[in-house]
Structure formats: structure tokens, C-alpha cells
Amino acid sequence: MASYTPRVRKLYTLIFPLGDGRVLLGYKKRGFGRGKYNGFGGKVEPGETIAEGAIRELEEEAGIKAKDLPYHGILFLEATADPASPILEIHVFTSTSWTGEPMETEEMCPEWFSVPSNSADTSHPPIPFQTMWEETVEWLPILLGFYFPVSKGAEKIQMVHHASFKKGLNPQTGLQDIWHGMDENFIQWLGSDEADENGYPGRLENWTEEVKDRWIEERKKASFDA
Ligand SMILES: COc1nc(N)nc2c1ncn2[C@H]1C[C@H](O)[C@@H](COP(=O)(O)OP(=O)(O)OP(=O)(O)O)O1
């Protein structure tokens, strides 16, 4: 029987704190993604769970400690220009309850933005999609759009998203940057207790490493063959 060798992946977390009709984003002041707005997160450290890593990073970056942590999805990000590089596996959460007040830290400057919905708090500016990672623009409106009108059971909405990036000149920095432009991109929304017709579990909690790799490879092949 052929043995299964998992692909190298780096684990990251990403949290979007939510208020009534508003979302807290962080302006990244240094390092990877500097100059962009994003959720709060970072690498999962050895010995901690993904949820523990998410809570720690939110506190380090925004000064608040999450009391709830609905799980929404996984982003698989890959550099097309560098096939040997690991896949970034980013686990996405929201949070609606925390202790402390958002505050600027060495890494991030937190700011509230209005989410377009019936209950939107219009005292904040609209989400600055033009200064966010381009793959985030694909799924964040759907995630927030689902979340706000449907408060009951909203924590069940989940997604998997694969995006690959090509090398090029980054117009923002003027440098060669493998994350410069999005190449292939496919997204699947989950929300069922049943597996789909291809056998993929309807809940992310049930996705094994092997299932994740198979899903990515099948989607890539389908997009190549199309
Ligand atoms: C390129 O596409 C990305 N899109 C989005 N939305 N988020 C991304 C993308 N690539 C990375 N991220 C997220 C994942 C993490 O939340 C941060 C990066 O974390 P960082 O490299 O700053 O990790 P830390 O552990 O905080 O690093 P240091 O403490 O060593 O600065 O961005």
C-alpha cells in the first residue's frame, strides 16, 4: 500500500473581532504584510493548539483576549513561482466577546470599520479592501455578509480557499515579491453535517491532512485542465 507523505505546511491564525455592524482590522506596521489591513494573527508556536495560538496572537497584536472563537475556515496559500516553498495554512476565526480594549501595539494598529448590512454602524469608515491582501477580498465580504444578517448558527459557516501567488514587481514596494499577484484561486463553502458528493466532509473539523492535500491537488488539476 502506498504511504502518504504530508506536504510541508506552515500553520498560521487569523482572527476578525466583530461588533454590532462593525469589524476590527489591524494596520500592519512591520514585517510580512506591512502597510496592509488584515485580521490579527501569526504563526502557531510549537506546543500550542491552533486556538491557543489565535488567542495569544490577538492579545499580542491588539491587546484584547478573546472569550469566544467561532471557527470559519482555512486559507491555503502557495507560491506558484516557488513550488518548493511550504503552503501557508491559515486558520480563520471571528470573535464577538473579549476582555480589554483594542490598543495599538508594536506590530498592529487596530481600527473599526463598518460592515455593509442593515445594522451597520456607519460611524466607521468602510472596509479598506484596496489595502488588503487580494485573496482576502474574495472571501471576507461573504464571511461577513453571512455573519451579520444571520446571527443564529453563524459560527457554522466555514470555507476552504486555495490561492496561489506569482512572482512579480510589487507596485507598493517596488521589490520582487512572490506574493505580488494572485494566480489560481478556488474556494468552497462548507456548512453541512454530511460529506459532499466527492466525499469531502461538510465540517472543517473533520478534514484530515490527507483530505486537505487531496482537495488542493484536485482543485489545481481541475483548474489546469479547464
Ligand atoms: C498572502 O495572503 C494572506 N492573506 C491574508 N488575509 N492573511 C495573510 C496572508 N499571508 C499571511 N497572512 C496572515 C497570517 C498571519 O495572521 C499574518 C502573518 O503573521 P506573521 O508573519 O506576522 O507572524 P508572527 O508570528 O506574528 O510573526 P513575528 O512575530 O515573527 O513578526 O498574516
Image: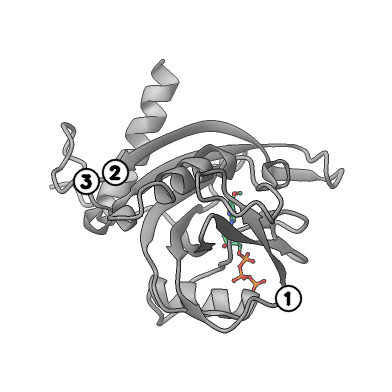
The kind of residue tagged 2 is Leu
Residue 190 has which mark?
2
Q: Crowdedness of circle 2 by 10 Å Cα count: few (<14), some, many (20+)?
A: many
Q: What element carries label 1?
A: loop
CA–CA distance in space, label 3 to label 1: 38 Å
Q: Crowdedness of circle 3 by 10 Å Cα count: few (<14), some, many (20+)?
A: some
The kind of residue tagged 1 is Glu
Q: Place residue 61 in its image quadrant.
A: bottom right
Evaluate if marks 2 and 3 touch, with contact meaning CB atoms under 8 Å apart.
yes
Marks 3, 1: nearer the viewer: 1
Residue 132 vs 111, above or below: the answer is above
Residue plotted at (18% across, 33% down) = 198
Query: Which is nearer the eye, 79 or 82?
Result: 79
Residue 5 in view in this figure: no
Residue under label 1: 104
Residue plotted at (18% across, 36% down) = 196
The kind of residue tagged 3 is Gly
Q: Quadrant of the C terminus?
A: top left
**Relative to residue 19, is residue 189 drawn left or right?**
left
Residue 183 locus on image (x, y percent): 58, 31
**Relative to residue 210, is residue 69 drawn left or right?**
right
Residue 202 locus on image (x, y percent): 21, 46
CA–CA distance in space, label 2 to label 3: 5 Å
Q: Crowdedness of circle 1 by 10 Å Cα count: few (<14), some, many (20+)?
A: some
**Relative to residue 72, is residue 120 drawn left or right?**
right
Residue 151 vs 191, above or below: the answer is below
Q: What element carries label 3?
A: loop
Residue 6 locus on image (x, y percent): 33, 54
